[in-house]
Image (cartoon, rainbow, N blue to C red):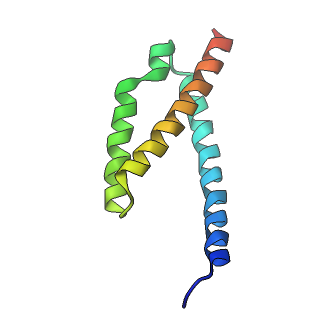
Amino acid sequence: MTASLDDVRRQIDALDAQVVDLLAQRERLVRSAATFKKDEQGVRAPARVEQVIDRVRALATERDASPDVVERVYRAMIGAFIELELGEHRQTR
């Protein structure tokens, strides 16, 4: 069965909705984790970032996804969440 471009786009749109749901869940956890961090270095946590990157690159390989694309997406996402955390951290300190 051959899918049309519209069919593929509908599938992508459905996946995007799932991705946004997962990002919302991740944000709630990030906000929760932020309450345990004492300073900006704790928020930035470069060693933890690299640990996550290593893990998701391995997951990408296992799942036949591009590790480079997954890393770039995760670095962008982590950077955005770090900025969110820093903003909240500054407001509560």
Residue drawn at 67 percent across, 58 percent down: 17
Query: x%, y% of residue 88?
Result: 65, 20
Query: x%, y% of residue 79?
Result: 52, 31
Query: x%, y% of residue 90?
Result: 63, 12
Residue at the bottom extreme? 1
Residue drawn at 61 percent across, 38 percent down: 27
Residue at the top extreme? 93
Query: Which image quarter: residue 91?
Result: top right
Query: Is residue 15 visible from the viewing direction of this image?
Result: yes
Q: Is residue 35 above or below residue 69?
A: above
Q: Total of numbered circles in the picture?
A: 0
Query: x%, y% of residue 85?
Result: 59, 24
Q: Is residue 41 above or below residue 78?
A: above
Residue drawn at 48 percent across, 45 percent down: 73
Residue drawn at 38 percent across, 30 percent down: 48
Left or right, 89 with respect to 76, comes to right
Towards the viewer: 78 or 89:
78
Q: Quadrant of the N terminus?
A: bottom right
Q: Is residue 10 above or below residue 65?
A: below
Query: Is residue 38 visible from the viewing direction of this image?
Result: no
Towards the viewer: 6 or 27:
6
Q: Quadrant of the C terminus?
A: top right
